[in-house]
Image (cartoon, coloured by chain):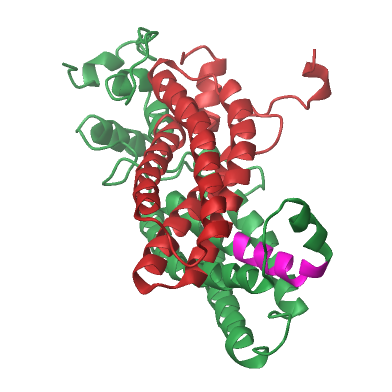
Chain colours: A green, B red
């Protein structure tokens, strides 16, 4: 534990971002936006398309011309994009897991320590990548071969599988939230606090938009000034 | 007057387990960016199908951004930002509200384009797409700073703020 804190002190005073990564903002959580947004919307539009006869009056009331073929196009192209992006999401995730230095003295709200949370999140990531690719292949077969001449382009079992995967994604996302929000993995401020440094001191020169109230820069722990880089 | 109707705040300073705003923004970020990509590919390959995909993604993004703002305001209000974080939180708020208006206008324009000439897109719309992409990416960068640099709503930051060590 002590050596970890020393390592943090060294890192945060040496000009690197201080989050344990060679760049300022973690990449994986950003690609997650794309994976989840694209997958969930793909399934949602396939559901809307499959139930289109029921929704006809609503779209008519909104004066929006709709073709169910157009809705199925969203279901298909968004799913393809989700599958492509998720390879990068998982790759970035594993890179950032490798560089993580999680605290060992904490338990998550699900009763897991940081290492176990990371292992489950890693397994979940690979599992979800496989499921998303599998769903894309299944969707492609339905669209171009099995159901090419059907009014309803997707099987109910496909939509149901999508909803089940939403559940897995919720669990996976909660594990990810524990890693960032509870364990503070790759969170600059959390690492600074754990090293006894007031984040205000390290960051006050950095916001894009400077605040007028920016005066509170008292050291968190007296004496921590000695290890601070001089601020110009 | 509503304090008693909500569960007590947890160690993320939230009345529910984890932040919701970063989840809702999936549906703004992913849908806007994918709509722009589909428009670009559709424009150069003259594929009207992709324009239809793009339109629906913009509709979804426009609905989602208002939900994102509601949760964003709740969570910003409970964020107890410390001095270094205040500026970026304010700018993120300002751009977020602006983006809701901008997205609504663009999607409205898109609705008209889709009614009048569903097979093609004006070049000006592609230009607006490019500007929108820059704005969304900058907004994502600010939100990333709030979560991953300043650690707002993380356990360590909430604890330090409650102990009066971080303000």
Image coords of residue B66 (percent x, y): 62, 37
- Vertical position of residue A86 compared to residue A210: above or below: below
Task: Residue A139 in the image: state x and y as whole percent.
Answer: 61, 80
Give the image location of residue B113, x and y in percent: 51, 55
How many labels, in total? 0
**A219 and A28: which is toward the camera:** A28
The quadrant where residue A107 appears: top right
Residue at 58 percent of width and 67 percent of height: A74
Q: Which is more toward the observer, A5 or B96?
A: B96
Judging depth in this view, the residue of B88 and A128 nearest the camera is B88
Q: Position of residue B144 (x, y in %)?
A: 42, 39
Please, is residue B12 above or below residue A133 in the view?
A: above
Chief secondary structure of the magenta portion: helix
Establish if B72 lies above or below A81: above
Question: The N terminus of chain A appears in which quarter of the rendering?
Answer: top left
Is residue B4 within the magenta segment? no
* Membership of A52 in magenta stretch: yes
The magenta-colored residue range is: A41-53
Question: Quadrant of the image for the C terminus of chain A?
Answer: top left
Camera sees residue A33: no
Is A227 displayed left or right of B6 in the figure? left
A205 vs A25, left or right, is left
* Of residues A133 and A8, the one drawn nearer to the viewer in this rendering: A133
Write down the quadrant of residue A152 in the picture: bottom right
Say left or right for A56 vs A35. right
Which residue is at 74% across, 57% downward? A59
Q: Can see residue B113?
A: yes
The single residue placed furthest to the front in the displayed view is B116
- Quick check: A156 left or right of A176? right
């Amino acid at each position: 534990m002590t050596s970890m804190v020393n390592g943090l002190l060294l890192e945060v005073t040496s000009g690197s971002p201080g989050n344990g990564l060679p760049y300022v903002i973690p990449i994986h959580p950003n690609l997650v936006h794309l994976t989840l947004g694209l997958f969930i919307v793909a399934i949602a539009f396939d559901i809307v398309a499959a139930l289109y006869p029921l929704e006809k009056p609503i779209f008519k009331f909104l004066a929006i011309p709709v073709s169910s073929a157009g809705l199925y196009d969203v279901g298909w192209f968004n799913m393809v994009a989700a599958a492509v992006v998720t390879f990068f999401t998982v790759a970035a995730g594993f890179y950032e897991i490798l560089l993580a230095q999680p605290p060992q003295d904490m338990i998550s709200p699900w009763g897991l320590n940081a290492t176990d949370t990371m292992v489950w999140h890693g397994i979940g990531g690979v599992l979800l990548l496989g499921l998303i690719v599998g769903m894309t292949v299944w969707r492609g077969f339905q669209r171009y071969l099995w159901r090419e001449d059907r009014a309803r382009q997707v099987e109910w079992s496909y939509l149901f599988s999508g909803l089940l995967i939403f559940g897995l994604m919720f669990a996976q996302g909660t594990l990810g939230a524990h890693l960032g929000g509870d364990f503070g993995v790759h969170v600059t401020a959390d690492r600074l606090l754990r090293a006894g440094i007031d984040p205000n001191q390290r960051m006050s020169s950095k916001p894009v938009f400077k605040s007028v109230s920016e005066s509170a820069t008292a050291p968190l722990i007296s004496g921590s000034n000695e290890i601070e880089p001089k601020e110009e | 007057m509503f304090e008693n109707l909500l569960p007590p705040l947890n160690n993320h300073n939230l009345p529910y387990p984890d932040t919701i705003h970063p989840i809702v923004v999936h549906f703004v970020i992913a849908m806007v960016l994918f709509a722009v990509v589909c428009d670009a590919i559709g424009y150069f390959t003259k594929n009207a199908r992709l324009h239809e995909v793009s339109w629906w993604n913009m509709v979804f993004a426009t609905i989602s951004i208002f939900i994102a703002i509601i949760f964003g305001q709740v969570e910003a209000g409970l964020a107890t930002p410390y001095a270094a974080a205040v500026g970026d939180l304010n700018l993120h708020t300002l751009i977020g509200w602006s983006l809701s208006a901008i997205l609504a206008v663009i999607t409205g324009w898109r609705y008209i384009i889709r009614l009048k000439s569903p097979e093609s897109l004006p070049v000006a719309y592609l230009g607006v797409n490019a500007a929108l992409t820059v704005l969304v990416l900058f907004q994502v960068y600010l939100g990333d700073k709030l979560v991953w640099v300043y650690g707002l709503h993380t356990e360590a930051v909430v604890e330090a703020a409650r102990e009066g060590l971080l303000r």
